[in-house]
Image (spheres, rainbow, N blue to C red):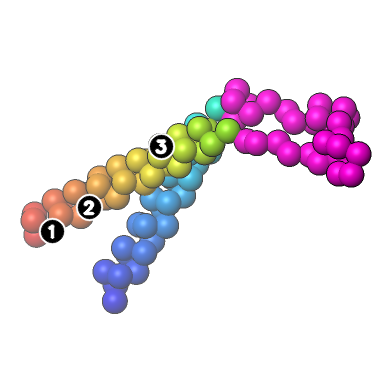
Amino acid sequence: METRAIGAIGSGVGSLIGYGIGKTVELPLNKKFNPDPTWSKYNPQPLSNELPFIYSYKKNIIPEIWGNSVGELGNRLYQYQREKYNNGEKNEK
């Protein structure tokens, strides 16, 4: 039971580290690739006489992909280092 709890805590810490690293990468890229869409809200154009004003803003997914990839990489690196530390500790005993 103790091993499961330690594994769960380690996984949680790894996810937290990965999330932080991923958001650190995603936010600056999001500002670069997805400019502020508020200009479209103040300059609406109807599509036709029958259709009302439709606000559609397509977000670029590149920042999310990079953020998630780097975050998962951070998580995996932490898990790898923790596993290596745990295995080294067990071999010394």
Q: Residue furthest top?
A: 32
Q: Quadrant of the C terminus?
A: bottom left
Going by the numbered disc 2, the residue's amino acid type is Glu
- The secondary structure that most of the magenta stretch takes on is loop
First in sequence: mark 2 vs mark 1: 2
* Residue with the mark numbered 1: 90
Q: Quadrant of the N terminus?
A: bottom left
Across and down, in percent, residue 18 comes to: 43, 44
First in sequence: mark 1 vs mark 3: 3
Could you say which is closer to the camera, residue 11 or residue 49? 49
For marks 1 and 3, give the one nearer the viewer. Answer: 3
Alpha-carbon span between mark 2 and mark 1: 11 Å
Left or right of 15? Residue 32 is right
Looking at the rendering, which quadrant does residue 87 occupy?
bottom left
Rendered view: 33 above or below 22: above
Left or right of 3? Residue 38 is right
Q: Which mark is residue 83?
A: 2
Across and down, in percent, residue 22 comes to: 48, 39
Alpha-carbon span between mark 2 and mark 3: 20 Å
For marks 2 and 1, give the one nearer the viewer. Answer: 2
**Stretch in magenta:** 30-59
> Which residue is at 86% across, 44% downward?
51
